[in-house]
């Protein structure tokens, strides 16, 4: 954790590490892993809310917990930019990190793959591999999506690639 800013270190240390090494094909072990995932997500969400830094909502889209959907948002210049968030748990999870998708931003930045999958290969994937199976969904959001949003959204807004919903509404009313 050398070289990390104090806020990231603090956040990461408050997200519980996961103990069960199980993926979607592992039956009862996967159920246990999902319980740990939910506990970590609840802890991370609670911590964010207590620091007035609430920035996402997600939930499992299917009973197996292999498809997740939700919303994430980023505030830039006092305007809130909100995006759909979705991802599937890979069959090889937790050895393979989930590929986080923001479909509305597909094609708007080179730091994204087809389908709106954000690029996490250089910085996040080695960290995930080093910490497997202790990292989970909450860690992917904290160390993957949060820094990606912080780096990319201001650039996309300032370049005009994305517009605030109020700007789009007022332009269409004119």
Image (spheres, grey):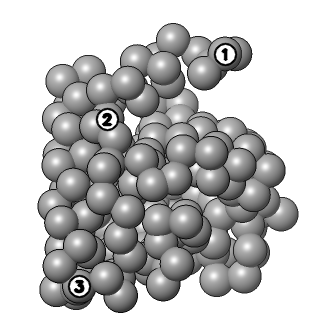
Judged left or right of residue 137, residue 127 is right
Along the line of sight, the residue nearer the viewer: 166 or 126: 126
Foreground: disc 2 or disc 3: 3
Along the line of sight, the residue nearer the viewer: 19 or 65: 19
- Whether residues under marks 2 and 3 lie with C-beta atoms below 8 angstroms apart, the answer is no
Q: Which residue is mark 2?
A: 15
First in sequence: mark 1 vs mark 2? 1
First in sequence: mark 2 vs mark 3? 2
Please rate how many residues cluster around mark 2, counting C-alpha atoms within 10 Å: few if below 14, some from 14 to 19, many from 20. Answer: many
First in sequence: mark 3 vs mark 1? 1
- Whether residues under marks 3 and 1 lie with C-beta atoms below 8 angstroms apart, the answer is no
Q: Gap between marks 1 and 2, in whole Å?
A: 18 Å
Tag of residue 27: 3
- Residue at 38% across / 62% down in the picture? 21
Q: Position of residue 133 (x, y in %)?
A: 45, 55
Q: Which residue is mark 1?
A: 2
Q: Gap between marks 3 and 1, in whole Å?
A: 37 Å
- Residue at 59% across / 15% down in the picture? 5
**Quadrant in the picture for the N terminus:** top right
Q: Quadrant of residue 99?
A: bottom right
- Residue at 47% across / 72% down in the picture? 93
Q: Position of residue 12 (x, y in %)?
A: 42, 29
Q: Quadrant of residue 108?
A: bottom right
**Depicted 17 relative to depicted 91: above or below:** above
- Whether residues under marks 1 and 2 lie with C-beta atoms below 8 angstroms apart, the answer is no
Q: Could you tell me if residue 174 is visible in this image?
A: no
Helix, strand, or loop for circle 2? loop
Judged left or right of residue 71, residue 133 is right
């Amino acid at each position: 954790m050398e070289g990390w800013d104090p806020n990231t270190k603090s956040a990461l240390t408050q997200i519980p590490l996961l103990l069960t090494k199980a993926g979607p094909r592992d039956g009862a072990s996967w159920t246990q892993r999902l319980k740990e995932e939910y506990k970590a997500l609840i802890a991370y969400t609670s911590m964010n809310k207590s620091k007035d830094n609430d920035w996402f909502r997600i939930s499992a889209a299917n009973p197996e917990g292999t498809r997740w959907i939700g919303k994430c948002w980023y505030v830039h210049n006092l305007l809130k930019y909100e995006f759909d968030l979705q991802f599937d748990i890979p069959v090889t999870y937790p050895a393979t990190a989930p590929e986080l998708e923001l479909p509305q931003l597909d094609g708007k930045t080179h730091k994204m793959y087809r389908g709106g999958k954000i690029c996490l290969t250089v910085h996040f994937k080695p960290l995930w591999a080093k910490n497997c199976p202790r990292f989970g969904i909450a860690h992917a959001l904290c160390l993957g999506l949060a820094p990606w949003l912080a780096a990319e959204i201001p650039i996309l807004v300032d370049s005009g690639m994305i517009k605030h919903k109020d700007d789009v509404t007022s332009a269409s009313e004119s």
